[in-house]
Image (cartoon, rainbow, N blue to C red):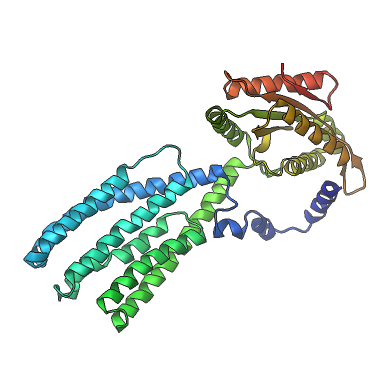
Amino acid sequence: MKFEQQVNNQYTDEAVTTSFFDWLKSFSLQDLFSSHNHSDDFNGSRAEYITVRVRLLAFIFAVLAPLWIPIDYFILPEGDFVSFLLLRLAFTAFFLLLGFWSSGPHNLFLARLRLVFFLAIPSLFYIASRCILGESIQDEGAMIGYSFLPYLLAVFMAIFPLTLLEGVAYAVLIGITFVSCEFYLGNLFTLVVLGDVWLLGLLAGIAVWAQLAQLYMLLRLYREATRDVLTGLVNRRVLTKWLDLEILRTREEKRPLSILLFDLDRFKRINDTYGHLTGDHVLQTFARILESEFVNSKYIGRYGGEEFLAILPEQNEEEAMAAAERVRIACHDNPLQTADGKVIKFSVSIGVAELRPEENADALLLRVDKGLYHAKESGRDLVARSA
């Protein structure tokens, strides 16, 4: 009866919950700390967001780096100019490669790898330039053109939506580059360099804060666009996108794939008899049943109205029929009890279909809808496979 207790608690909480607590419930701090709880779909969107910015910045660096060559010519000693010319050309070439590097569907691992390269290229340039110059340039104003890269990288990191762990890791990479270089040159414990370390740390802290703010806004916008507000499950747009991806994987890996289409029986009668608020609680209760029955599957969502869809990778039709039957029975075992003590029983009709070799997503959804129609025409509260 855990679903009954949960819904009763919702009735009580609604009278005292403030907008502040609603805001706290809208996201978890864990979402900002790491990407462990993020969905694959959101990770793909964030990976695309990061990738586009890395490529754009790579092209900007590739264009700007050669523009400093004339200044190198007038400032650097003749012996250092050739070394710096080759270094800048290599710097430009690597950023061009990073900018032109394209891949298939965006994934978070590749996006993180791009970001590592984006930091590594200027970091290596900075270390090489500092080692080549040494004490060749005495004018501190002229040296700014060769020593500003760590600060620039710290500032640029603010444009990426990163988790706290990611942001700190990249900030540490920048810090290690700067500190190790100054330590090698014997300048680390001077007052000027210690002040530079403090400034770099301050910039990195501001960048991490900006990264978290971007991540929070991106998560919020994503959830508003992809989540059903009432049940907390994903909406139809995400479900159809997931189904297309799973069909591709099924073809590649030659494994079964089944889907279930649920429709709450006589739901309009519940709304008309008990009111729409009670109908909303029935939908929420059924959503919790689905989450409990498919605890190891993320592919469940509200398909529309009182219809829900579950995508079951690696399950054939017989396994899907058994899962559907468990959901049907769970609805009988978890009636809804309202705040005034009324017990509301509800049932569900379920269509089942397994992907066929020649089918696309639309054909599969059409067949499972026919199975659902057969279950409802046969008396409701049934599980029926498609023809």
100 vs 318, nearest the viewer: 318
Q: Nearer the viewer, residue 211 or 273?
A: 211
**Which residue is located at x 88 percent, y 49 percent?**
339
215 left or right of 383 in image: left
The residue lying toward the viewer, choosing from 54 and 297, is 297
Task: Answer with left or right where residue 18 lies relative to residue 112.
Answer: right
**Which quadrant of the figure has residue 349?**
top right
Give above or below for 178 relative to 61.
below
Q: Position of residue 47 (x, y in %)?
A: 46, 46
Return the residue nearer the eye: 291 or 303: 291
The residue sitting at the front extreme is 254
- Residue 334 visible here: yes
Number of numbered labels in the structure image = 0
Q: Is residue 54 above or below residue 208?
A: above
Say which quarter of the image contains residue 70: bottom left
Residue 64 visible in rendering: no
Residue 107 image position (x, y, % from top left): 47, 44
Q: Residue furthest top?
A: 387
Q: Quadrant of the C terminus?
A: top right
Residue drawn at (84%, 27%), measured in percent from left and top?
A: 381
- Please indicate whether residue 352 sits to the left or right of residue 219 in the image: right
| 318 horizontally vs 226: left or right | right
Residue 12 picture location, percent across and down: 82, 54
